[in-house]
Image: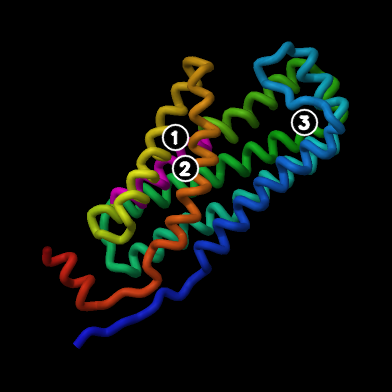
Amino acid sequence: MKVSSKFRGPSLTLLGTIHILLFAAGLVAAATLRHGAPYINPFAAAEAVRAFFEQNPAAVRVSNFFLFASAVPLGLFAVTMVSRLQFLGVRAAGTKIALFGGLTAASALILSGLFGWVLSLSDVAASVPVVRAIFFLSFLFGGAAYAVGFGLLAAGVCVTCYFFCLLPRWLVVLGMLVAVAGEFSSLSLLVYPANFLIPVTRYLGFIWLMLAAVKLPKSRDAGDVVGVFEA
C-alpha cells in the first residue's frame, strides 16, 4: 500500500519572491535617491568614487539595507530547498553542496550590504583610501562571492534532481548554466571582463530559482521513493 505525505515547511515560491523583491527594491531605491547621478564603478578614479559616496549617503544607506535584507529569504530558501529534497528521499552529497552554496551566497549578501552601508557614513566617505577599500570589499562579496555560492546552490540542486528525476530536464540544464556562470565568475578576480558573468548568474539565477520553487514536488509517494533507490 502506498502512503502519500506532503512536505510541511516554508513556501519556496514565497521565499524566492521576497528575495527578488527586496533585491529589486534596493535597485529602485538607489536609482531614485541618487537623483540622476550615475552608478559609480569600483574601478573608477579614486576621487570620483569618494565623491559619489559623499554626495549620495541616503541612496547608499537604503539600497544596502535592502541588499542586506534580501539575504535572509535567500538563506531560508536554501535551507528549505535542502529540507524538501531530503523529505523527498534524497540522500546525496548534492544536498550538502546546495546548502553550503546557498548559505555562502546569503552570507556574501549580508557582508556586502553591511560594508556598503558603512560607506554612507560621512566620516568614512571623507577618506579616499578607506572608501576604496570598503567599496571593493562590498563589491567582491556582492559579486564574485555571491555568484560562486549561488552557482553551487544551483549545481547541488540540479545534479541531485537530475538523478532522482525531481525537476524537468530543461530546468536542470538552465540551473547548470547558472552554476557554470557562477563558478567561472571567480575569474573576475584575475581578469575584469569576467565580471559580466556575475549579473548573468544573478538574473538568470532569479528565473531558475522561481521555476525550481514551483516545479519541485511538494509531496512524495513512499512506494515511488523506494523504487528510485532500488533502481
Q: Which of the numbered marks, if any, corresponds to residue 119? A: 3
- Mark 1 is on which residue type? Gly
Question: What percent of the width, then of the height, locates residue 161?
Answer: 30, 55
> Quarter of the image containing the N terminus?
bottom left
Does 160 appear above or below 226? above
Q: Earlier in the sequence, mark 3 or mark 1?
A: 3
| Residue wearing tag 2 | 150
Write the residue at 82% across / 25% down: 125
| Disc 2 from disc 3: Cα separation | 25 Å
Element under label 1? helix
Element under label 2? helix
Does the magenta stretch mainly form a helix, a strand or a loop?
helix
Q: Earlier in the sequence, mark 2 or mark 3?
A: 3
Give the mark toward the camera: 2 or 3. 2
Q: Considering depth in this image, is 131 or 172 the residue closer to the camera?
A: 172
Q: Is residue 9 left or right of residue 64?
A: left
State which region is magenta: 145-159
